[in-house]
Image (spheres, rainbow, N blue to C red):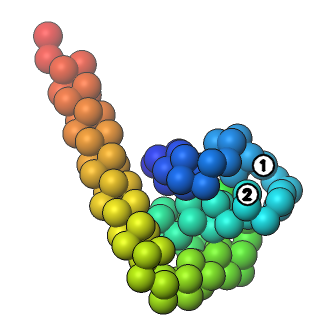
Amino acid sequence: MASVCRAAAAAVAGAPFAALAAPQRGKADIARARQLAVYLQHVALGATITACAGLFGRDRATIRHACARIEDARDDAGFDAAVSRLEAAAKAQSALVSQLIDAFHQGADSP
């Protein structure tokens, strides 16, 4: 589900989706969008730091740093409200995809 978080972060940052998956850091706006994607993956979807590191091709220290940067930025009420909405949207999208996967597999198992 990392792509859900990447897509949400890319959309709100106006960044290309592929840039968030690039191995290099990129410009500040790309790095910030990636930090948001990582944060959503960890906080909203409950992925571990280790899992996020693997999903985003970064080391654990970088993932912790990304989450800390976003958490610190949430002191701003407007940013906090926007991130709260993104968290809710990521959770809803993830739940929908899980339901669709379950329904697909149930349908595939029936004759």
Amino acid, disc 1: Ala
Q: Is residue 105 above or below residue 34?
A: above
Pointer 1 local density, CA inside 10 Å: few below 14, some 14–19, many at least 20: few
Pointer 2 local density, CA inside 10 Å: few below 14, some 14–19, many at least 20: many
Q: Which residue is mark 2?
A: 30
Q: How many marks?
A: 2
Q: Is disc 2 in contact with disc 1, using a CB cutoff of under 8 Å?
A: yes
Q: What is the CA distance from the residue labelled 2 to the residue labelled 1?
A: 10 Å
Left or right, residue 58 beside residue 11: right
Q: Which residue is mark 1?
A: 22
Percent x, y of residue 12: 53, 53
Left or right, residue 81 beside residue 8: left
Percent x, y of residue 65: 67, 81
The answer to whether any part of residue 45 appears in the image is no
Q: Residue at x 48, y 89 (%)?
A: 75
Q: Residue at x 37, y 55 (%)?
A: 90
